[in-house]
Each structure stands twice: as structure tokens, then as C-alpha cells.
Image: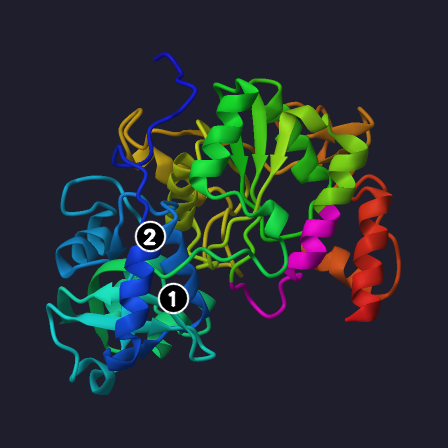
């Protein structure tokens, strides 16, 4: 299969649901008369992701006809692969007065008018069933499951409009929406682009697998997630500074583009790996790195379950190539980063440091060993922990 400079978005068309100037003026004129629904942080980021085409082919929040097969079979009603339900859930009391066929004003948590829903349907759903299928557990301690259990019992469906695309408050220069990232790849002449998802600060194992992938493609799209994450995850601004530092010192700058992914984290493990791959396809990536325990949390998923799930789809069906990497470590025999595929070492000759162990060292103001973290990055993390 010949690679095109512009890989087709999922479903064939890059969706754009950002209101034009005239649409915006019209919606603003109706603002006070419309019924209102207040979105939480995750729904706000879903609204943005739909509007900018990152969730193509979605034009709005899912109807029951799409929701049910996505939950049960990882496919939309059309048969197109999709692994995570994108829904707007409200309480029955909020849903009751809303008229199907009418417009609903969408406000952010501060009460600001940010979008509109063309309400096509209201439907109830089974929270435990969604949890069991999507998150593979009904345990309320799972952060993704907790969100499902805490949300309202009615889903509002229909196309959306985002009132306007605003600059990101923290990272305006890294806000590269899919239309922009696609053009950047094209302008650079890149035909093959590998995407990398992260919610953690970069360490040597990440660097190793990114650079292995870079040996076989034209460019790397470093795409850290900056939407809602767990309270104990390292804040996005700290992670972004770590990326800036490591790119400046240790990467060929002409072969890497750093941009933010404004999505919220679901912690859905295998299902979210597919979801993350499809999002990167919409941003223009042809390949996607899937490492150990991708999008996992706790012990809910097997170490490589997020890689095995790609085998449930026919070759080429997802339209993006997963690049599967084993857990990387520092090999004391070869004095380099490696995986079990390349290292002759025995387990006791390997330096593995878990994120938890590293966080403990950093909290104590200790630099992790250079085998695990670049010193400039570790210093930045220590500084951030002292100031937090």
C-alpha cells in the first residue's frame, strides 16, 4: 500500500464544527432564550475534539444507534471501528424539559456559553454494562468507571457547534489542530509520521522507543495529552517543559513536531489505545506507538493487552499502523537502553525504574540515575515538586 502524504481522516472526511462568524452571531442572538446544559471538564474537551475534527467522523454526541454497538462491538452503526463512547450525560431532571429537535446551549463549568447541541435524541443507558465492556471492570475505584457512575442517567445526542476556537490558556503555540498538523506534515514533505501518546513525563525508555520508531518513518509527532487527568498525575505544564528540554538537547529538531492533545484521559487501557490511534490518524499520523500498559491504570489490564486488541481488527481496517514496543530498560551488559528483544541480559542485569519509584526519588529531591532519566528533565521535575 503506497503511503500518501495526507492519510485520510477516519471515515474519509475531516469534520469541522466550529461556527462561522455569521453562525456565531446568530447563536449569540439566541443565547438568552435557549435551555442550558453545563458541561464538566471532560465534556468540554469532547466538544472541542469533535469540533476540530479530532474525533472524525463524529459531528456530535453519539446517538443510541452508534452508542450501543460502540460499547458492545467497538463499531459504529456504519461498521466503522470506534472503541470509546462519546456521550453527553445529564440527569433526568436536566433532560426532561429539553425538546428533541431544538437547540441546547452548552456552557462551560464557569457558566460561559461555548457551544450548541442540535438535540436529536434523549436516551437512557446501562452504566454497569458500559463500565464492564469499555473499562473491563465494574469497580467504582477505577477512575474511568467512577466518571461513568457519577454522570447523569440520560444521554443527549446530536450534532454540535463550537462557538469559537480559543487559544489554549497554557500552550497556545502548541495548539496544532488536525487541519494544522496535517498541513505541517505536508509542508515538511513527511509521508510517514509516527504519533506518540503520553500523560507522564518523558524518561529514557520513552526516548528509546520514539527513536527506534523514528528510524523507520519521516517524522515524529509528539502529542502529550493535556485534558483532564487523575489528581496524582504530573501536571501538563510540567510535562510540556520536560518535552521542550529533552527536544532541545537530545532530538533532531527538524524531525519532531510537538503539539498538544486536548482530550481528557479515560484510563480505558486497550480500548483507549485504539481510540488514541484513531485520534492520531485524524491528526495525520500514519503510525502510532503502543507501548507497555497503554492508557492503563492500577492492575486492571494485562501488560500488553493494549497491543493484542489491535489484532481484533482486520489488516488495514483501522487505517493507521500500530508500532508495538516491549518494555524498555537500561541493560548493564550492553550499557544501553534495550528491550528483551535486543538485550542479552538476565533480569537482574536490567535497570527498571517504575514511575512510582521515580516520583518517590523526586519527592526526596534525589535525581534518578542517568540510565532512567536525562538529568535536565529530572532537575525540572524536582523543581516542580518543590514548588507544588
Q: Is residue 214 above or below residue 312?
A: above
Percent position of residue 259, x then y? 58, 43
For disc 2, the marked residue is 20
Query: How far is the residue under mark 1 from the one under mark 2?
Result: 22 Å
Q: Label 1 crowding class (10 Å Cα cut-off): few <14, some 14-19, many 20+?
A: many
Q: Label 2 crowding class (10 Å Cα cut-off): few <14, some 14-19, many 20+?
A: few
Percent position of residue 231, x then y? 59, 70
| Residue situated in front as seen by the camera: 92 or 291 | 92
| Residue situated in front as seen by the camera: 132 or 163 | 163
For disc 1, the marked residue is 43
| Residue situated in front as seen by the camera: 229 or 136 | 229
Q: Of callouts 1 and 2, which one flags the residue occurring earlier in the amino acid sequence?
A: 2
Q: Is residue 142 visible?
A: no
Query: Which quadrant of the figure has residue 338?
Result: top right
Question: Residue at coordinates 33% horizontally, 61% vertically from top-left?
Answer: 24
Decide if residue 132 is on the left or right side of residue 373. Answer: left
In magenta, the rendered stretch is 228-242
Decide if residue 124 is on the left or right side of residue 207. Answer: left
Amino acid at each position: 500500500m503506497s503511503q500518501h502524504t495526507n492519510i485520510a481522516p477516519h471515515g474519509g472526511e475531516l469534520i469541522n464544527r466550529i461556527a462561522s462568524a455569521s453562525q456565531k452571531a446568530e447563536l449569540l442572538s439566541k443565547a438568552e432564550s435557549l435551555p442550558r446544559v453545563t458541561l464538566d471538564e471532560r465534556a468540554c474537551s469532547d466538544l472541542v475534539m469533535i469540533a476540530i475534527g479530532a474525533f472524525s467522523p463524529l459531528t456530535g454526541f453519539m446517538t443510541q444507534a452508534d452508542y450501543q454497538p460502540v460499547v458492545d462491538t467497538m463499531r459504529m452503526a456504519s461498521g466503522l471501528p470506534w472503541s470509546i463512547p462519546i456521550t453527553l450525560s445529564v440527569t433526568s431532571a436536566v433532560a426532561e424539559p429539553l425538546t428533541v429537535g431544538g437547540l441546547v446551549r452548552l456552557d462551560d463549568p464557569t457558566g460561559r456559553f461555548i457551544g450548541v447541541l442540535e438535540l436529536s435524541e434523549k436516551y437512557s443507558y446501562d452504566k454497569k454494562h458500559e463500565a464492564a465492556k469499555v473499562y473491563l471492570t465494574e469497580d467504582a475505584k477505577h477512575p474511568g468507571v467512577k466518571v461513568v457512575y457519577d454522570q447523569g442517567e440520560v444521554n443527549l445526542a446530536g450534532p454540535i457547534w463550537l462557538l469559537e476556537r480559543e487559544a489554549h490558556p497554557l500552550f497556545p503555540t502548541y495548539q496544532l489542530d488536525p487541519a494544522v498538523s496535517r498541513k505541517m506534515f505536508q509542508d515538511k514533505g513527511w509521508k510517514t509520521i509516527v504519533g506518540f501518546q503520553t500523560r507522564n513525563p518523558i524518561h529514557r525508555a520513552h526516548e528509546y522507543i520514539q527513536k527506534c520508531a523514528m528510524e523507520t518513518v519521516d517524522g515524529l509527532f509528539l502529542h502529550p495529552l493535556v485534558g483532564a487527568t487523575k489528581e496524582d498525575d504530573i501536571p501538563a505544564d510540567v510535562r510540556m517543559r520536560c518535552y521542550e528540554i529533552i527536544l532541545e538537547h537530545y532530538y533532531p529538531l527538524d524531525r519532531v513536531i510537538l503539539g498538544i492533545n486536548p482530550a481528557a484521559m479515560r484510563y480505558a487501557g486497550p480500548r483507549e489505545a485504539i481510540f488514541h490511534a484513531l485520534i492520531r490518524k485524524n491528526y495525520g499520523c500514519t503510525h502510532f506507538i503502543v507501548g507497555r500498559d497503554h492508557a492503563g491504570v492500577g492492575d486492571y489490564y494485562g501488560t500488553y493487552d493494549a497491543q493484542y486488541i489491535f489484532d481484533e481488527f482486520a489488516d488495514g481496517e483501522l487505517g493507521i499502523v500500530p508500532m508495538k514496543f516491549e518494555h524498555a530498560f537500561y541493560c548493564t551488559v550492553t550499557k544501553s537502553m534495550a528491550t528483551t528483544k535486543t538485550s542479552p541480559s538476565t533480569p537482574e542485569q536490567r535497570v527498571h525504574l517504575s514511575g512510582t519509584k521515580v516520583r518517590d526519588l523526586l519527592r526526596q529531591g534525589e535525581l534518578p540515575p542517568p540510565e532512567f532519566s536525562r538529568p535536565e528533565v529530572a532537575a525540572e521535575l524536582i523543581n516542580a515538586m518543590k514548588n507544588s
